[in-house]
Image (cartoon, rainbow, N blue to C red):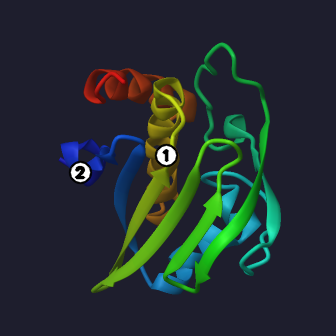
Amino acid sequence: MTELATRSAYGSLIEPTTLKIQRRLPGPIERVWAYLTESDLRKQWLAAGAMEMTVGASFELVWRNDELTDPPGQRPAGFGAEHRIQSKIIDVDPPRRLAFTFGNAGDVTFELEPRGDAVLLTVIHRRLPDRSTMLKVSAGWHAHLDVLVARATGQTPAPFWDGWSRLQQDYDRQLPPR
């Protein structure tokens, strides 16, 4: 059984409105940092958008989830081919920590910690405004990180939307009602 298939692959609430999810990735830490901060690499697993690595710098994230995997799977109703949010860098300590606002849905922190030849990536999404957003974000981070792990390890990622839909149902069963 791989780490992706284990219970530990799921995110958990560490506070009522804060999700934490972790993945082990092949190092070195600078390689993982590049996947977080360089638009051309980040768009392969999450969203495009140039970032100036300066506290206070604004940037836009652009999701095109249909382009993450081939095939993309069945896109759920209510999702367009593209999604954009405005963000702002709130903390940066290369190559260990990056935090930014996440549109109107709180803020996200990426923390990187070397672990031998690997890197532990911790994603913490704070101030999730409601349960519906929490379910979308939980499934989203999980599915996007699965794509990142596949890309970083030279594997072919599973269809993104099919995984996202399954994961949203899983998180609906796992996360407490609000």
Name the front one of labels 1 and 2. 1
Q: Quadrant of residue 38?
A: bottom right
- What label sits on residue 2 in the rendered view? 2
> Mark 2 belongs to which amino acid?
Thr
| Residue 10 falls left or right of residue 104 | left
Q: Secondary structure at mark 2?
A: loop
Question: Residue 106: x and y, percent?
Answer: 58, 48
Choose between 99 and 165: the one closer to the eye: 99
Question: Residue 1: x and y, percent?
Answer: 17, 47
| Residue 23 falls left or right of residue 45 | left
Q: Earlier in the sequence, mark 1 or mark 2?
A: 2
Q: Secondary structure at mark 1?
A: helix
Can residue 155 be seen here? Answer: no
Neighbor class of circle 1 (other Cα within 10 Å; few <14, some 14-19, many 20+) is many
Q: Residue at coordinates 51% horizontally, 64% vertically from top-left?
A: 109
On screen, residue 148 above or below 72: below
Q: Residue at coordinates 43% horizontally, 44% vertically from top-left?
A: 142
- What label sits on residue 141 in the rendered view? 1
| Residue 5 falls left or right of residue 107 | left
Neighbor class of circle 2 (other Cα within 10 Å; few <14, some 14-19, many 20+) is few
Q: Residue at coordinates 78% horizontally, 29% vertically from top-left?
A: 81
Q: CA distance from mark 1 to mark 2?
A: 18 Å
Q: Farthest residue toward the top?
A: 77
> Mark 1 belongs to which amino acid?
Trp
Q: Residue at coordinates 70% horizontally, 23% vertically from top-left?
A: 79
Q: Quadrant of the C terminus?
A: top left
Question: Residue 114: x and y, percent?
Answer: 35, 84
Choose between 15 and 38: the one closer to the eye: 15
On screen, residue 65 above or below 149: above
Q: Are marks 1 and 2 in contact (CB under 8 Å)?
A: no
